[in-house]
Amino acid sequence: MKIAIFTLILAAAVSAPHQLPTCFASTHVQAGKDSSHQPDIERAIRGFLIALYSGDAAEYQKWILPEPGSNDLLSSRQPTETELLDLRKEAESTRLQQVAPFVFEGSELTIISGNRHPIGTKTTFMTGFRGTVVAIPMINTETGWKVDVRFWVAMKKQADGATFKQTDPEVVAKAFLYYLLARQPQKLKQLSAIEINAEEYTKANNLPGGDLDQILSLCIEMPVVRAREGESFKMPSGEIVKAAKDTDTIVLIGMLGTCEVAFQVKKVGDQWKVIPQKYFEMLRRAGAI
């Protein structure tokens, strides 16, 4: 298996302080077949890129879903008129590739009623921009398609040295996936919210050493965020879970390359633990590994 190595830009890498770590992503993710809304999506992505790299905060906020800390991603350098013209030309001509299907309430959309995507439909695009590869999650809203920058914000916090506790649910979720992919069933078992035969969760993993090392590096860098209240995701088991507010079970979302990975993390006693799922099989089906 060959894994393409991409730089997943999760901040405006115009100046050194905004540069973030590299990630690995697979090119084998199948895109959605429907293209009826792609002109609207592409217009939003191009507007977003121009505003992001030019540092235009007001314009930038028009193209994104509201997110605390989102302005921290903006370039702090004001471009000259010539630089802004070049930026606009590049953004308008860059090739955009859909790398995830259209998904609504956790399920892939196969039929679009009235040629319109429901509010809340999601997908992900990728483009080469300014010498890097940029993964751009998108959500359809009442006011049009918007860029979902929450993964970018989380990745920037990691890059800036934010402190995380080993007991934080986001860290526990990431550790669970890491131990599953690393074929460490005993450590995996310790993070499970229920008793499991942990070897059943690792035995399908037949990745050779070099590929496994790349995937584990991607897992370490994976940003993990809390799902928004009411947001739905399909788990590897096929179950659809919906994020609720103020419960002892929370839904977390990681972005592994261009693939969203959903976790249910449950409070067991005074510790957060993961409701186990067979993530390797899910990632293999998605073409992410």
Image (tube, grey):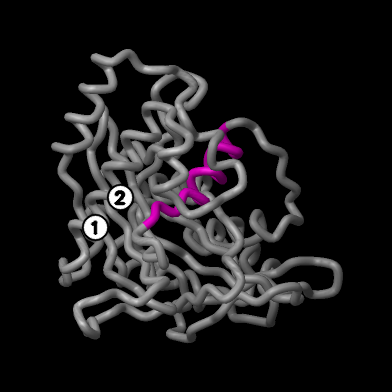
Q: Quadrant of the C terminus?
A: bottom left
Q: Would residue 154 be counted in the magenta stretch?
A: yes
**Residue located at (50% from left, 34% from top):** 73
Residue 289 is at least partly visible in this image: no
Above or below residue 30? Residue 148 is above
The secondary structure making up most of the magenta span is helix
Distance from label 1 to label 2 (Cα)?
Answer: 6 Å
Q: Position of residue 227 (x, y in %)?
A: 57, 65
- Residue located at (62% from left, 66% from top): 188
Residue beneath disc 2: 44
Q: Nearer the viewer, residue 4 or 144?
A: 144
Q: Is residue 89 above or below residue 41?
A: above
In terms of secondary structure, where does tag 1 sit? helix
Q: Of helix, strand and loop, which one carries label 2?
A: helix
In this view, 37 is above or below 266: above
In this view, the residue in front, 104 or 216, is 104
Counting from the top left corner in percent of width and height, residue 260 is at: 43, 62
Q: Is residue 139 visible?
A: yes
| CA neighbours of label 2 inside 10 A, class few (<14), some (14 to 19), many (20+) | some
If the image is split into quadrants, where does the N terminus sit?
A: bottom left
Q: Magenta residues, as a range? A: 146-159
Q: Residues within 10 Å of mark 1 (few under 14, many from 20)?
A: few
CB under 8 Å between discs 1 and 2? yes
- Using the image, tell me which numbered label, if any, was put on residue 40: 1
